[in-house]
């Protein structure tokens, strides 16, 4: 394994998830600080996991070696993530006027149905 491979693996598997976790925790802290009633913390957590998974699978396809874990990620993103996102869309539909975070949650969950197929198409072309 060369130094470049080690750096690529570190960035994809350690740095990207750490950055995503940092931004989620920052957003969570901001929601708690604004003292919202019923903030969409769990929904945003699921959205962060799903979009993070999309990013990790795309980066793996572009710069790394395909693995069993990447296949499990695709399995989740194709079979389970649409159900999760549809649930979040339906749940946030009545709350999207409550706060900017609820509207953000609604929009991000809704956008999954446009972004995911585009990323899957890119991965299909690459592989």
Image: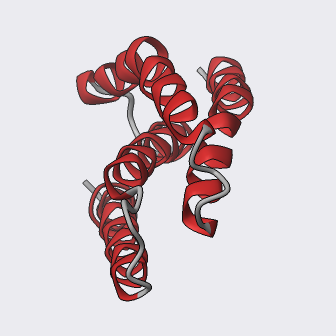
Question: Across the whole image, how many numbered discs are drawn on residues?
Answer: 0
Q: Could you tell me which residue is drawn at 42 percent across and 26 percent down?
A: 84
Considering depth in this image, is 11 or 41 the residue closer to the camera? 41
Q: Could you tell me which residue is drawn at 37 percent across and 88 percent down?
A: 33
Residue extending farthest bottom: 33
Residue 18: give x, y in percent of width and height: 30, 69
Considering depth in this image, is 106 or 37 the residue closer to the camera? 37
Residue 9: give x, y in percent of width and height: 32, 56
Is residue 74 rendered to the left or right of residue 120? left
Instruction: Look at the image and tell me in which quarter the C terminus lies.
Output: top right
* Visual colour scheme: secondary structure
Is residue 104 rendered to the left or right of residue 121? left
Q: Is residue 16 above or below residue 54?
A: below
Q: Could you tell me which residue is drawn at 50 percent across and 45 percent down?
A: 51
Q: Is residue 69 above or below residue 99?
A: above
Q: Could you tell me which residue is drawn at 66 percent across and 31 percent down?
A: 119
Residue 60: give x, y in percent of width and height: 45, 41
Residue extending farthest top: 79
Is residue 1 rendered to the left or right of residue 40? left
Considering depth in this image, is 1 or 53 the residue closer to the camera? 53
Instruction: Look at the image and tell me in which quarter the N terminus lies.
Output: bottom left
Considering depth in this image, is 2 or 103 the residue closer to the camera? 103
Looking at the rendering, which quadrant does residue 81 occupy? top left
């Amino acid at each position: 394994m060369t130094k470049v491979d080690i750096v690529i693996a570190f960035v994809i598997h350690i740095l990207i998830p750490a950055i995503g976790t940092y931004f989620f925790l920052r957003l969570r802290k901001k929601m708690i600080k604004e003292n919202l009633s019923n903030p969409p913390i769990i929904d945003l957590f699921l959205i962060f996991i799903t979009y993070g998974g999309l990013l990790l699978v795309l980066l793996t396809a572009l710069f790394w070696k395909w693995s069993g874990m990447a296949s499990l990620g695709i399995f989740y993103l194709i079979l389970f993530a649409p159900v999760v996102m549809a649930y979040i869309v339906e749940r946030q539909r009545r709350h999207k006027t409550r706060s900017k975070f609820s509207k953000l949650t609604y929009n991000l969950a809704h956008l999954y149905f446009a972004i995911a197929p585009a990323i899957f198409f890119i991965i299909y072309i690459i592989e």
